[in-house]
Amino acid sequence: MKVTIWVDGSAWQGRGGWGVVLVAGRHRKELSGSIEEGATNQRMEILAAIQGLRALKSELVNDIDAMVISDSAYVVNCFRQQWFVKWRTNGWTRKPKGRQRTPIANRDLWEELLTLDEYWTPRWRHVKGHSGVEENERADELAADARRALA
């Protein structure tokens, strides 16, 4: 069974929301949620991907061909360019040119997402945000609505 998982995040002043649209054939499911403190756009983008993969039924692990589609190059490139390999090798730190090692931001969420990625082995695809792609626009709406509901 092919499942496409459209994900997006939204953050403003420490409050954040995430949105997910799962599509499998004619079936469609929408999910969203929010957090009140410590939200950044990047955290919400990662959290959306986590929630999308969490929504899959584990008993179908061998029968699901999943693709996660995000407008976050940060999330997609982590997997397509395997940034996480270097992060793990370097003890979850990075070294910008001419600077000392700094911790990888959002390690807690990355570790959970990497575990889900290893379990489900989805393909990762980037789509340009706000470009009229229906499911991406809907995931964006869900995330923004969840964030605004906190105000």
Image: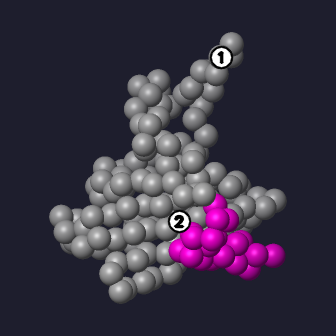
Q: Residue at x 57, y 70 (%)?
A: 133
Residue 22 shown in magenta: no
Question: Which comes sooner in the sequence, label 2 or label 1?
Answer: 2
**Above or below, 33 relative to 130:** below
141 sits to left or right of 46: right
Q: Between marks 2 and 1, how big is the CA–CA gap?
A: 32 Å
> Residue 37's x, y, as percent?
72, 61
- Per the picture, the main secondary structure of the magenta-coloured stretch is helix
Residue 135 visible (yes or no)? yes
Residue 35 visible (yes or no)? no
Q: Residue at x 42, y 43 (%)?
A: 80
Residue neighbourhood size for the residue with mark 1, other residues' Cα within 10 Å, grouped as few (<14), some (14–19), many (≥20): few
> Residue 50's x, y, as percent?
47, 60
Q: Foreground: 39 or 5?
A: 5
Q: Foreground: 82 or 50?
A: 82
What residue is pinned by disc 1?
Answer: 97
Quarter holding the N terminus is: bottom left
Residue span colored magenta: 129-151
